[in-house]
Image (cartoon, helix red, strand yellow):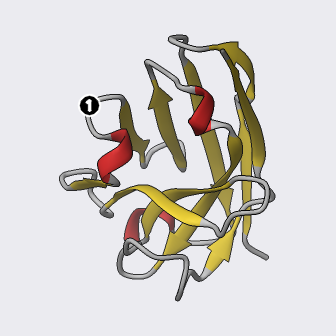
Amino acid sequence: QVQLVESGGGSVQAGGSLRLSCSASGLTFSTYGMGWLRQAPGKEREFVAAIDWSGGSTYYADFVKGRFAISRDNAKNTVFLQMDSLKPEDTAVYYCAARYPRVKNTPAGIDYWGQGTQVTVSS
């Protein structure tokens, strides 16, 4: 069965950095668009970033542009999210997501979800 396993979350002070990883199995990884979405307490799940199957195209929510970078390694079935200049409002559970052919800027239509990893940014 398909599994998406996130790692790399944690607690950091504002201005700090974290790198999330998502290891995928049970799917033809190199054909799927991958993405990251997040959900803060009391809020709806929202799109953060996405990358196409080749890694040649990336997409970002406006609130992370210039601070976050998504990348993938198809040889290792892994997608990454580098998060720099973190802000307290980035505090959320971050979910890895897979969708064929690509992740759109909405939680709707996602084929597979990871279990989520907590990111906490303190001021």
Crowd tier of the residue under label 1, counting other residues whose Cα lies within 10 Å: few below 14, some 14–19, many 20 or above: few
Q: Nearer the viewer, residue 94 or 34?
A: 94
- Count every numbered label the image shows and give the total: 1
Task: Report the residue marked by disc 1.
Answer: 66
Q: Position of residue 40 (x, y in %)?
A: 71, 52
Q: Residue at x 27, y 51 (%)?
A: 55
Residue 23 vertical placement versus 86 (above, below): below
Nearest to the observer: residue 67 or residue 95: 67
Left or right relative to 42: residue 12: left
Would residue 3 be found to the left or right of residue 74 on screen?
A: right
Quadrant in the rendering for residue 4: bottom right
> Residue, x 37% and y 45% (percent of image)?
63
Is 80 left, or right, of 112 in this rendering? left
Q: Residue furthest left?
A: 56
Q: Position of residue 49 (x, y in %)?
A: 40, 53
Picture coordinates of residue 57, whole percent (x, y): 20, 55
Left or right: 96 in relation to 86: right
Q: Describe the element under mark 1 as helix, strand or loop.
A: loop
Q: Amino acid at mark 1?
A: Gly
Residue 31's place in the image compared with 42, above or below, is below
What x and y, as percent, mark residue 95? Answer: 66, 56
Tell me the quarter of the image containing the C terminus.
Answer: top right
Q: Quadrant of the N terminus?
A: bottom right
Residue depicted at x 42% and y 41%: 73
- Residue 54 drawn above or below residue 78: below
